[in-house]
């Protein structure tokens, strides 16, 4: 009975529509097609995606995380760090942002009117006035809309954060080099990247190498995940 089961499994495998080897070939083909697509992408000046960050861009998009911009990191320009920004805007998100822009303009107008009417009153006392009610109601509405926008546009950043958590589960590195995804900008970069651009040139160069090494390690982790994912 055991032999029959093994034989049956072998026959099913042999004649299955997609064998293991074909699956691997398909993944390779998908990778090549995405790489060819990425080769057509460029920045506003027409420069192609940097070679040192290209594989990161490819694999993120293959894992369902839409990238917007990227850089491999340079000493002569920018912050001296590799980075990738992930998609933030959705059609609903863009509509919410337009609403927020209009509401914030009205908010600033109301705040200015209150200041002009009661220039000597501290902020807390101005807010307690009956005339401040429209201002306070609008403030609450803006807070609610901002939360909706954050949830609407958090999708790819949440996915990326989950992958980073998995990557660092069994990995140790310095806090300086550790990769993070910024909650607001959607930038994937090392923690120390925020201030690396203003550091001494020698320190900046050393950090750049470490940041690039960490990004390559994360890219290798993502590639393994893509090719082994069933």
Image (spheres, rainbow, N blue to C red):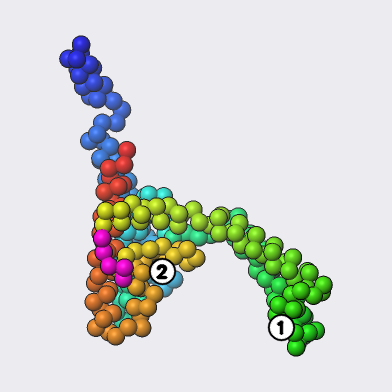
Image disc number at residue 43? 2
Give how far across and how far down residue 177 sits, in percent: 30, 68
Q: Which residue is located at x 24 percent, y 65 percent?
A: 213
111 or 205: nearer the viewer: 111
**Gap in Å between the C-alphas at discs 2 and 1?**
48 Å
How packed mark 2 is, by other alpha carbons closer than 10 Å (few <14, some 14-19, many 20 or more), is few
Give how far across and how far down residue 130 sits, in percent: 82, 72
Q: Which residue is located at x 34 percent, y 68 percent?
A: 190
Q: Secondary structure at mark 2?
A: loop
Task: Single out the mark in the foreground, 2 or 1.
Answer: 1
Image disc number at residue 222? none
Give how far across and how far down residue 189 sits, in percent: 36, 66
Task: Please identify the quadrant where the N terminus is shown.
Answer: top left
Bounds of the magenta span?
172-176
Q: Which residue is located at x 36 percent, y 69 percent?
A: 191
16 or 197: nearer the viewer: 197
Q: Secondary structure at mark 1?
A: loop
| Residue, disc 1 | 122
Left or right of residue 58, residue 126 in this image: right
């Amino acid at each position: 009975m055991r032999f029959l089961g093994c034989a049956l499994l072998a026959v099913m495998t042999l004649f299955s529509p997609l064998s293991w080897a074909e699956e691997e070939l398909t993944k390779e083909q998908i990778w090549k097609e995405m790489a060819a697509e990425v080769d057509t992408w460029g920045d506003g000046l027409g420069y192609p995606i940097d070679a040192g960050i290209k594989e990161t861009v490819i694999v993120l998009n293959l894992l369902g995380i839409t990238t917007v911009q990227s850089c491999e990191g340079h000493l002569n320009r920018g912050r001296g760090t590799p980075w990738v920004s992930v998609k933030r805007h959705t059609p609903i998100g863009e509509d919410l942002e337009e609403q927020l822009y209009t509401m914030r303009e009205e908010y600033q107008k109301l705040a200015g009117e209150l200041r002009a009417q009661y220039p000597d009153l501290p902020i807390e006392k101005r807010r307690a006035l009956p005339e401040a009610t429209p201002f306070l109601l609008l403030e609450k509405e803006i807070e609610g809309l901002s939360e909706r926008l954050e949830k609407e546009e958090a999708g790819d950043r949440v996915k990326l954060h989950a992958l980073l958590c998995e990557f660092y589960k069994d990995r140790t590195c310095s806090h300086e080099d550790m990769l993070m995804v910024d909650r607001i900008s959607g930038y994937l970069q090392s923690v120390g990247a925020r201030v690396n651009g203003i550091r001494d040139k020698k320190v900046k160069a050393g950090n750049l190498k470490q940041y690039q090494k960490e990004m390559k390690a994360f890219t290798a982790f993502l590639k393994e995940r893509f090719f082994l994912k069933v």
